[in-house]
Amino acid sequence: MKKKSMILAASLLAIITSLVVSFRKKNPEPDIFRYQITSTWDLPDQLKNTSGIGMINQQKIACITRDKGSIYIYNLKTQNIEKQINFGNSQNYTDIEIVGTTAFILKKEGMLIKLEHYKKDPLITEYQIFNDASRNASGLSYDASSNRLLIAVKDDKFERKGTKGIYGYSLATNRINFNPDYEIELNSSLFAERKNLKAAQRFSPNAISKNSKETVHILDTRHHELLKVDKLNKSEELYKLREEDFPVPATISHLKNNNILVFNNSKKPRLLEIKLK
């Protein structure tokens, strides 16, 4: 009797398993991780705590760390740091962008540092772009179509209205437009799973990058997400990043093929190239 019961239980388990497998095949779970990792680089310890990366060309990137006033030029092909350029001894560096022979470095308190001819004896100029330090400036990207820098902030005065702005800084006039060029709609259905949080906590920009298709991607480190916003200022898509792939995704930059470089700050710093699906 006991043997028959065991056989019956095993048969029922097999039937249930078969039904579950069949159901999953007919009703596959949605792929919320819509990206493919195409390349990886294990980086030297000098690049720990990197807070910003900027493309020099398709073979070299410039890196800035949060607490050291140095630019590191890293060669993706040889996988070596080619040069270290010292420019200051402050802290709170959040991002870097390279425009020709000029490097722009953003600080948390809303200061922009301009290094002309940055590779050798740079001429350094500082601009206080925000009239207060409360916005928590976090991301920087060059918009070649209008010769301006796009600046993302974690904390915005428009949060109470349910938005966070991406601001344009003109390189021709050295002035910022306080009317956001892009807006993150914090009450969007994209963030529905966090509707119980305060609006300001639903998406927190850490980095920004604009590609050749006039599309902006914004990284949220806390929530392991990339937000895609098109040139019509519409929040189009939200891409989730696996925590096992990106324990601490710190900053991003676009390659010429429109793939995205994501810098991951963990025990061992790593750079990953991803292609969005």
Image (cartoon, rainbow, N blue to C red):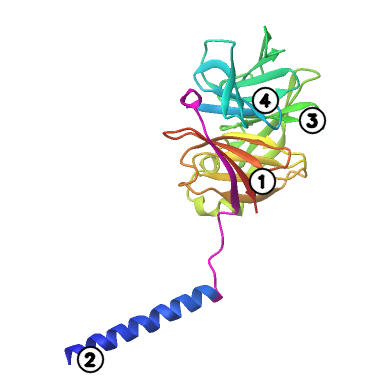
Of 34 and 271, nearer the camera is 271
Q: Earlier in the sequence, mark 4 or mark 1?
A: 4
Residue type at mark 2? Lys
The residue segment tinted magenta is 26-49
- In this view, the residue farthest toward the left is 2
Decide: few, some or many residues near mark 3? Use Cα within 10 Å; few <14, some 14-19, many ≥20: few
Q: The disc labelled 4 sits on which kind of residue?
A: Glu
Give the spatial CA distance, label 1 vs label 2: 58 Å
Residue 202, placed above or below residue 173: below
Q: Secondary structure at mark 1?
A: strand
58 displayed left or right of 15: right
Residue pointed to by mark 2:
4
Instruction: Determine which residue is flagged by label 3.
Output: 144
Tag shown at residue 97: 4
Q: Is residue 275 above or below residue 49?
A: below
- CA gap between label 1 and label 3 equals 18 Å
Tag shown at residue 228? 1
Locate residue 96, reporting x and y percent. 63, 24
Q: Earlier in the sequence, mark 3 or mark 2?
A: 2
Q: Secondary structure at mark 2?
A: helix
Q: Amino acid at mark 3?
A: Ala
Residue 13's x, y, as percent? 34, 81
For the residues carrying marks 1 and 2, which lies nearer the camera in this image? 2
Marks 4 and 1 sit apart, C-alpha to C-alpha, by 20 Å
Which residue sits at x=51%, y=22%?
Answer: 66
**Most foreground residue, 115 or 227:** 115
Whether residue 57 is visible to the viewer of this picture, yes or no, is yes
